[in-house]
Structure formats: structure tokens, C-alpha cells
Amino acid sequence: MCGPHLLHTAHDHDNGHRHAQAPARGVVPTITRPCPQCGQPLQEDFVFCPHCGAEALTACPSCHRAVQADWTRCAYCGADLLAGKTDSSIHSQHQHKE
């Protein structure tokens, strides 16, 4: 009788019974998405792109959940994410003119 084989690859037995390799314990597949600026693959939880430095995640000003930096609306509460960016960029521009 064949028992579990965790330390080697898939193999066949003379009777046609086949064992597949067990997945490594503690290994989680990495989910990626493209950087909104340079397009390089980023891990889903990266806040900044390690390739170009662009912001990839930010917090929703309304519900404070993580949202992608290129979203226009929060997928969780529906808040307008451009309103906060517009206000801060206008405020920043106004300070530079003074």
C-alpha cells in the first residue's frame, strides 16, 4: 500500500495509481497587478511601485479602506476619490503661488 509522499514529485505505481506532489506548506501564491504608472507587475499589497516609485495604494478618505491609487471611486463605500485629490492639488498649487 502506498502512503503519502510529501518530499518528492509525482510518481506512478505499477497498478496505475498516481500521486501528485503536495503543495509546499506556508507558500501563498502571489497575486500581481500592473503599476498604474509604469505597468510593471506589483504584488497586490504593495503601496508603492519598487520600479518607478509611483503610489499604488492609498486610503479612501471616507471609509479608510485601501484603494488603488488610479481608482476614481471607492469600491467599498462609493466615495469620490478624485474630489480629495483635486482639493489637495488645488491647495498645493495655491500655496506655491503665494
Image: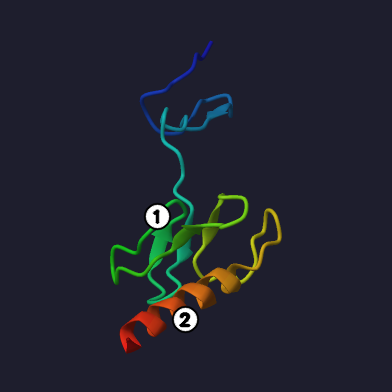
- Frontmost residue, 93 versus 62: 93
* Picture residue at 47% right of the left edge, 81% below the top: 90
Asked if residue 75 is positioned above or below residue 35 in the image, the reply reads: above
Question: Would you name the residue on which mark 1 appears?
Answer: 46
* Picture residue at 51% right of the left edge, 32% below the top: 20
Q: Amino acid at mark 1?
A: Phe
Q: Residues within 10 Å of mark 2 (few under 14, many from 20)?
A: few
Q: Is residue 62 left or right of residue 44?
A: right
- Residue 23 screen position, x and y as percent: 46, 33
Observer-side mark, 1 or 2, equals 2
Asked if residue 27 is positioned above or below residue 78 in the image, the reply reads: above
Q: Label 1 to label 2, Cα distance in Å?
A: 27 Å
Q: Is residue 26 left or right of residue 2?
A: left
Regarding mark 1 in the picture, which secondary structure is present there? loop
- Residue 87 screen position, x and y as percent: 52, 75
Q: Are marks 1 and 2 in contact (CB under 8 Å)?
A: no
Regarding mark 2 in the picture, which secondary structure is present there? helix
- Residue 12 screen position, x and y as percent: 50, 31
Q: Residues within 10 Å of mark 1 (few under 14, many from 20)?
A: some
Q: Amino acid at mark 2?
A: Ile
- Of the numbered discs 1 and 2, the one sitting upstream in the chain is 1
Asked if residue 92 is positioned above or below residue 21 in the image, the reply reads: below
Q: Say the numbered circle drawn on residue 90.
A: 2
